[in-house]
Amino acid sequence: MQRRRFLKNAAAAISALGLPAIPQWALAADKAVGLRRLGEPHPFDYAWLKGQARALAAAPYKTHKRVLPAPVEALDWDQYQSIRYRQDHALWADGDAKFQAKFFHLGLYFHSPVHMYDVVDGQAQELAYDPAAFDYGSSGLKGKPLPADLGFAGFRLNTRADTERDFAAFLGASYFRAVGKEGQYGQSARGLAIDTGTGGPEEFPDFIAYYLEQPAPGSDTVVVHALLDSPSVAGAYRFAITNGDVLLMDIDSALYPRETIERLGIAPCTSMFQYGENDRRMAWDWRPEIHDTDGLQLWTGGGEWIWRPLANPTHLRFNMFMDDNPRGFGLLQRDRDFNHYQDDGVFYEKRPCLWVEPKDGWGRGSVQLVEIPTVDETFDNIVAFWNPEQKPQPGEELLYGYRLYWGAQPPASSPLAHCVATRTGLGGVVGQKRKHFSWRFAVDFEGGELAALAQANDLTVEAVLQLSRGGTEIVSARPLHQIKGYRAMFDVVPPDESTEQIDIRLFLRRAGKPLTETWLYQWNPPPPAERTLY
C-alpha cells in the first residue's frame, strides 16, 4: 500500500437591559479569526453521532471521492508539501485553550473532502473551506479560482506554545498518527481495517466528518469525534487526546456493518520495516537499519508476554495469534540507538511505539500480523490489528473501547527480561568446514533477573527452544556482560530442500522458572541453489 505521508505540520454575557444570554457558540463564531461557519448550529454529542452512523449504514453506500479541480489534481509531492494553513486562521487561536487546530488542503493522495465542525457547549457548526486560509507557497495554486465548497482533507493539532510542530494529525481515509515527547512521527493508526491480508482487495474506510470540541482553558485533553463510512460499514468514534511525554488517545467506537465482513481489523497499527539486524534481504542502502518499528509485542489474556521481530518477507506473510480478552498489543520501536540507523534526517530511533490497550473485554479472537514485501522505505508494509472471532453481520452494533499510547515506551511492560536484539546469519562452527546448510540465530535478552545472574556468571540458565519442523544445533545460553543480560544462540537445520516456513519459539529459564518473554520467529529457508556453504 502507498505510504501515507503527513505534513509536519468568556462566558455568556447578560446585558443591563435584561436581554437573554448570548450562547457561547455565537461568541466563539464572532471571535474566531478568519473562520466562517456554514448553516445553523445543532445539538451534538456522541449518542447523536452514533445515530448518524446507524442511519448511514441503513442507506446504500455512496463514494466520497470526487474529481478535484485540474490544478489541484496535478499537484506533486513537493508542491503539495509547500501548502500551509495560515496561523491567523487556526481554530481556537483567539481563545484561552492550550491547543489549536489547523487544516490540510485537498490534493496529492487526498481526494475525499472531509466536513469539519467546531463544537462549543454541545452545539456543532460546520466550518467553511476558505482559500484565503491557506498559504499556497510554491504549489502554483491560486486561491481565488478554487471552488468555495472544495472542502478540507484533514486536520492537525498544535499546542499554543508551539504552533509549528503538531502532535497529532488526521489525514487520508481513516489514518491518523501522533508523537510523544520525542516529537517524531513514525507509524500510523487507522479507525478500521477491512480485509487486510486476505489476498483480495483491501477496503479503506473514510472518516468523512470530524467534530472538534473546543477545549476548556487549562485542559490537557482535546476531544475529537469522527464519522466513518465505507462500502461495508459505518461508524462513530470519540477520541479523547491527552498530550504528554507519552500521548494518550482514549477511544470509543461504535460500528454498524452494512454487510458481512470477512476480516475486521480493530485498532489497526500500520508501520514500515525494510531491514534490520535480523533481516537484511533488502539492505542495499548505506544506512545500517531502516524501520519505523522492529517488533510486535503481545500481552495475552492468559498473562504471557510475546515478542515477534518484524521482517520484510519475499511474499505476503500472515500470522494469527489466538487469544481471549487480550490485555494489550502493539508495534514497538525497541531499538532506540542512533548509531544503529545513522539517519539524521528522519531519525528512526525516535519513532514512537504504539500500544493498544482494550478498555473492556474483547472476547475471543486474534491479534493478526500482516507483513508485505517492500523494496524501500516509502511503503507501509506492516499491519497489526485485533480480529474478533465472530464475523460482523449487517444490522449489528459493535462497541469497542480502547486506549492508544504513543511514545518511546509502552505503558505496560513484563517483569521478565525482554529481547533487545535478534541477529541471523550462516550457521556452522568458525574454522571448521561446513558439511550442510544451517542458519544461525543470536537472540539477546536483558532485564528482570538477568543482570544479577549474568554478574554471577550463572551457567544454569537454559534456552528452551521449539521448532515446527527441522532440527537445531549448537544451542546455548550464556551471560552477555556488555548488556547485563544473556545471549541465546542456536542453528536451525532445514529438514529438506523446501522453502516452507519454519516457526521458532524460544525463552530462557532457570530451575524450571521462565526468565524472559517468549520470542517467536518465522523463517523461510532459501531455495537449494542459494544455500551456499562458503
Image (cartoon, helix red, strand yellow):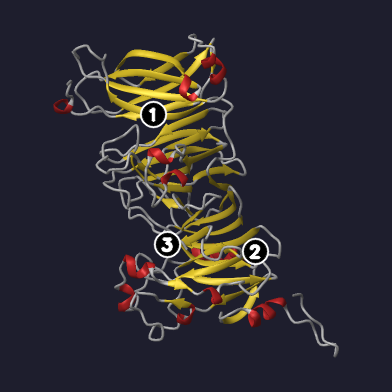
Amino acid type assigned to the residue bearing label 3 in the image: Gly
Residue 359 image position (x, y, % from top left): 62, 44
Quadrant hosting residue 447:
top right
Position of 470 relative to 380 (above/below): above
Position of 102 relative to 533 (above/below): below
Residue 307 image position (x, y, % from top left): 46, 31
Which is more N-terminal, label 2 or label 1? 2
Amino acid type assigned to the residue bearing label 1 in the image: Thr
Residue 273 image position (x, y, % from top left): 36, 43
**Foreground residue, 484 or 332?**
484
Quadrant hosting residue 161:
bottom right
Q: Residue at x 59, y 57 (%)?
A: 239
Task: Give how far apart the Cα atoms at labels 1 and 2 are.
Answer: 43 Å
Per the image, the residue denoted by label 1 is 422
Per the image, the residue denoted by label 2 is 98
Task: Give how far apart the Cα atoms at labels 3 and 1 are.
Answer: 34 Å
Counting other residues with Cα less than 10 Å from the Cα at mark 3, is it few (<14), some (14-19), or many (20 or more)? many
Provide the secondary structure element on which disc 3 rests.
loop
Q: Residue at x 49, y 38 (%)?
A: 365
Which is more N-terminal, label 1 or label 3? 3
**Outermost residue toward the left?**
529
Provide the secondary structure element on which disc 2 rests.
loop
Per the image, the residue denoted by label 3 is 172
Q: Residue at x 31, y 49 (%)?
A: 200
Position of 168 relative to 278 (above/below): below
Q: Give yes or no for contact between labels 3 and 2 (Cβ–Cβ under 8 Å).
A: no
Position of 301 relative to 428 (above/below): below
Residue 100 image position (x, y, % from top left): 59, 67
| Residue 50 visible here | no
**Foreground residue, 363 or 140?**
140
